[in-house]
Image (spheres, rainbow, N blue to C red):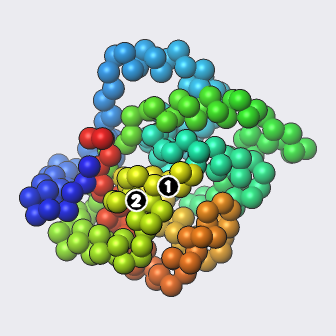
């Protein structure tokens, strides 16, 4: 778990600097280690087959921990939150601003799982199987920022997190949210920025977004960026 003590901060800064020196190639491919028993069990899980068959990997990566562009890593995410979001995307309740390709966020996933006539290509039971599998997948290690995050940025992010009362719903350091809320610790910086901005600007209104709006509506881009810097570097792999 990410700590904000001076020694821990020094370690994070040193590690980030080392990655920057060695090259971005190391930072772009965090390695998640799982036991042979875990891997064997994952191969047998029907959720894994469905995850691959329904093309989830195209955006969220193998095992849900290597998402492309500003899409989220979903390995180890809260079960209820994932089910709620999938259902909202399929029904059209969850929308968003355009992604890096110029297409509205969530539309790609909806297009893959819903026919032009509106028929679902995935059942409620299949969604549950996929989510059950994803919950147990190894989470992604934080991707060091470029340039490396500084001690001052970490402190500023932690201060903004507390001032914004983010812990009310997402828990201390974003690690233990209320039921149905997402775990935001260690999430990709680009995704955190995109979603906070979409909620603030009214592009995303589904689920708990209306409640979050009261917290983010007065945040400027700089504050959102500071929060995203801090949250994206919290390490969940040790938990």
Q: Which residue is mark 1?
A: 178
State which quadrant residue 153 falls in. Answer: bottom left
**Quarter in which the C terminus is drawn:** top left
Tell me which numbered mark, 1 or 2, is placed earlier along the sequence. 2
Q: Residue at x 32, y 21 (%)?
A: 35
> Quick check: marks 1 and 2 in contact, CB under 8 Å?
yes
Q: Secondary structure at mark 1?
A: loop
Badge 2: few (under 14), some or many (20 or more) residues near its Cα, within 10 Å?
Answer: some
Query: Seen in the image, is 74 located left or right of residue 227?
Result: right
Q: Which residue is mark 2?
A: 171
Residue 123: % across, % down: 76, 32
Q: In the image, what residue occupies the spot 23% across and 72% down?
A: 155
In the picture provided, is 12 more to the left or to the right than 48?
left
Classify mark 2: helix, strand or loop: loop
Position of residue 86 measured from the top left corner of the image (x, y, whole percent):
66, 46
Q: Nearer the viewer, residue 167 or 130?
A: 167
Q: Residue 5 location, x and y as percent?
A: 14, 62
């Amino acid at each position: 778990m990410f700590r904000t003590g001076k020694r821990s901060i020094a370690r994070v800064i040193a590690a980030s600097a080392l990655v920057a020196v060695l090259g971005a190639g190391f930072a772009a491919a965090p390695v998640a280690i799982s036991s042979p028993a875990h891997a064997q069990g994952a191969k047998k899980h029907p959720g894994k087959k469905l995850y691959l068959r329904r093309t989830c990997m195209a955006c969220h990566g193998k095992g849900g921990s290597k998402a492309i562009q500003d899409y989220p890593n979903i390995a180890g995410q809260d079960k209820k939150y994932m089910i709620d979001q999938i259902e909202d995307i399929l029904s059209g309740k969850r929308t968003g601003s355009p992604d890096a390709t110029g297409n509205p966020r969530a539309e790609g996933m909806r297009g893959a799982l819903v026919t032009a006539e509106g028929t679902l290509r995935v059942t409620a039971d299949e969604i549950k199987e996929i989510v059950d599998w994803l919950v147990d997948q190894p989470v992604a290690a934080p991707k060091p920022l470029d340039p490396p995050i500084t001690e001052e940025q970490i402190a500023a992010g932690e201060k903004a997190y507390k001032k914004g009362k983010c812990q009310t719903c997402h828990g201390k350091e974003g690690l233990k949210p209320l039921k149905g809320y997402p775990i935001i610790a260690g999430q990709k910086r680009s995704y955190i920025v995109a979603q906070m901005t979409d909620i603030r600007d009214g592009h995303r209104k589904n689920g708990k977004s209306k409640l979050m709006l009261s917290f983010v509506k007065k945040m400027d881009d700089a504050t959102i960026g500071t929060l995203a810097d801090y949250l994206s570097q919290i390490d969940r792999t040790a938990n």
